[in-house]
Amino acid sequence: MAEHKSYSNKIGLWGWLGGGRWGFERYLYTLHRITGLGMLLYFCLHIFVTSSRVFGLDAWEKWMGTFESPLFMVGEFLVFVAFAFHALNGIRLILIELGFSVGKAEEPVYPYKSSLNVQRPLMVVLMIVAAVLVAAGGYDLFALSH
């Protein structure tokens, strides 16, 4: 009968947040997780507020009245920033996982050339697109809505 080996998790939560060398891709990894959790929190709040409509129009209007301050307008913009980043970084990760942006096979010597020559330019292009989306969304939210 095979003996089961057990390994202790020595890095704990830090392994989930960081967990490796701190190149630019590692910062994107951490930011991707943070924005995902932030959007999950927003989604839960959104479901809670939307479900208040069940208790009548007065309950709905009371909740919606609390979200009309400038602070919540900035929060709404931050949710949009998180969405734009998370979506485009997710596209980058999908392209890497499917092998479209890996580059041709080579000897794995650090720093990996496929990472620098293929994946890094893809990351730069998608982050520029995210920045353009954020600028357009900020203009729409702050300049055009008032």
Image (cartoon, helix red, strand yellow):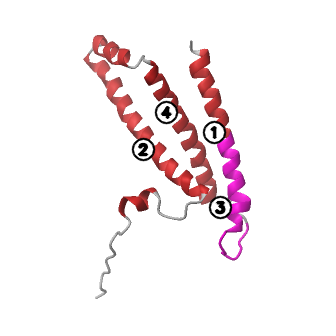
Return the residue at label 4: 79
Where does the image place residue 98, in percent across and percent down from the top left? 62, 59
Quarter of the picture containing the C terminus is: top right
Residue annotated with mark 1: 130
Any magenta on residue 120?
yes
Quadrant showing the N terminus:
bottom left
Q: Residue furthest bottom?
A: 1
Image quarter for residue 108? bottom right
Tell me where residue 54 appears, x and y as whole percent.
28, 20
Picture disc at residue 37: 2
CA gap, disc 2 to disc 1? 19 Å
Local secondary structure at mark 1: helix
Magenta residues, dominant SS class: helix
Question: Mark 4 falls on what kind of element?
Answer: helix
Callout 4 amino acid: Val
> Which mark is drawn over residue 99?
3
Left or right: 120 as drawn, with respect to 34 = right
| Crowd rating for badge 2 (residues with CA inside 10 Å; few <14, some 14–19, many 20+) | few
For the record, the magenta segment spans 104-128
Asked if marks 1 and 3 touch (Cβ < 8 Å), the reply is no
Rounded to the nearest angstrom, the CA distance separating label 4 from label 1 is: 13 Å
Amino acid under disc 3: Gly
